[in-house]
Amino acid sequence: MKFLQTLLFVLTISMSLCFAQTNSAGMLCQGRYYEEDEAADILKKLMQTIENKEDWEKRAEVIRQGILDGVGLKQITYDKTLKTIRHSWRKHKGYSVENIAFESLPGVFVTGALYKPLEIKKNIPVILSTHGHWSKEGDYGRFRKDAQTRFANFAKMGTMVLAIDMVGYGETREIGWEHKHKEALKLQIWNCLRAVDFLLKEEFADPERVAVTGASGGGTQTILLAALDKRITVSVPTVMVSAHFFGGCVCESGMPIHKSENHQTNNVEIAATFAPKPQLLISDGDDWTKNNPEVEYPFLQYIYGLYGKKELVENVHLPEEKHDYGTSKRQAAYKFLAKHLGLNISKLTLRDGSIHEKDIVIESEDQLKIFDGDHHYPESVVKTNNEIDWKL
């Protein structure tokens, strides 16, 4: 009898776990989840159901909670006691670079680099810069030439910039971390929150001027952080926001953040939760953002209009360009961020109105690494995704 009771208990638990896993998988919205016309119709119908600011704020709260529930985070927390490692400060013309790491969870070290203006006499804006899935040799993550150019020029414009590695990229990959892990999305959200903590601990960091920007998968990190972290004041998601495409990597859509038993949303609505704070969508004609001027941007304008702030959301669309954070896209970001972060960039502005990118040193991956032959990971380091202690 006792054996039968035990067997029944085990079968019940197994069936429950199986149902939970199937149910969770059924809630995932991944990749090209909708056809383009279908996605456009969904946004039109949403606008018909959202009549005023109060309607939208109720829905926005459901969307934010759906993200937290989907990744298994109870609430947004801030850490003022973040443990950090830093070394190898370098001086360049008009800016500096320093290799950094911070401990986002016990034994989990987020690696990156901090860029600053050379002369800081008062509080300045801060920018978190996230990166996407560029993984080719010599064209990799935050080490890419276009990425370093952007970080350095942001610093020369008068901001403090933190560029971090995605989960399983850069130095964490070298010690055994996976990028395409089932909970990569959860950790990337967490790491971005802690990255803002890091920035705001810096001397002269202005907590009233906090921006985030990134392209592709970095754009996904941008809209998620902007939706969840009330400290973010300006957002520039680049070549990512789409009504029909939800992100093709598990680090973007591998957990049920878009759908639950009580709601369904998309990345356009997630971006819209940032309203009415300044936001720039940068899009191109060669990827899933090709419809931004006709589909996604009008929806965002509608939501911002509910606050009487339609002018605070913009779209720079480059129909002849491709999926990157190239020169034209950087120019758009420079000007938007300068405008909304209160920066005087006259010294960097050329006669044609563009922002010059001169005197920038592109450093090697080895120069930008925090852990090397002379600087080792602490003994407490977690070496695989599966060893994370989420007991917060």
Image (cartoon, rainbow, N blue to C red):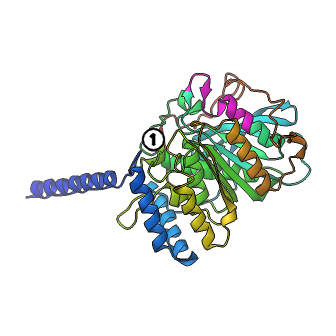
For label 1, count other residues whose C-alpha is less than 10 Å away and answer few (under 14), some (14-19) or many (20+): some
Asked whether residue 184 is drawn in magenta, I would say no
Image x and y of residue 228, in percent: 58, 60
Above or below, 77 against 308 in this view is above
Above or below, 366 against 289 in this view is above
At 51% across and 61% down in the image, what residue appears? 269
Residue 323 picture quarter = top right
Q: Is the stretch drawn in magenta largely helix, strand or loop?
A: helix
The residue indicated by pointer 1 is 249
Apparent side of residue 61 relative to residue 109 in the rendered image (left or right): left
234 or 103: nearer the viewer? 234
At label 1, which amino acid type do we have? Answer: Cys
At 76% across and 33% down in the image, what residue appears? 87
Is residue 336 something one can see in this rendering? yes
At 70% across and 53% down in the image, what residue appears? 211
Label total for image = 1
Q: Which residues are magenta?
A: 136-150
Asked whether residue 137 is drawn in magenta, I would say yes
158 or 50: nearer the viewer? 50
181 or 154: nearer the viewer? 154
Image x and y of residue 86, in percent: 74, 37
At 41% across and 54% down in the image, what residue appears? 37
Apparent side of residue 337 relative to residue 314 in the rendered image (left or right): right
Image x and y of residue 177, in percent: 50, 34
Image x and y of residue 204, in percent: 84, 52
Query: Is label 1 in a helix, a strand or a loop?
Result: loop
Apparent side of residue 242 relative to residue 364 in the rendered image (left or right): left
Image quarter (top left, top right, bottom left or bottom right) of the N terminus: bottom left
Is residue 99 something one can see in this rendering? no
275 or 198: nearer the viewer? 275
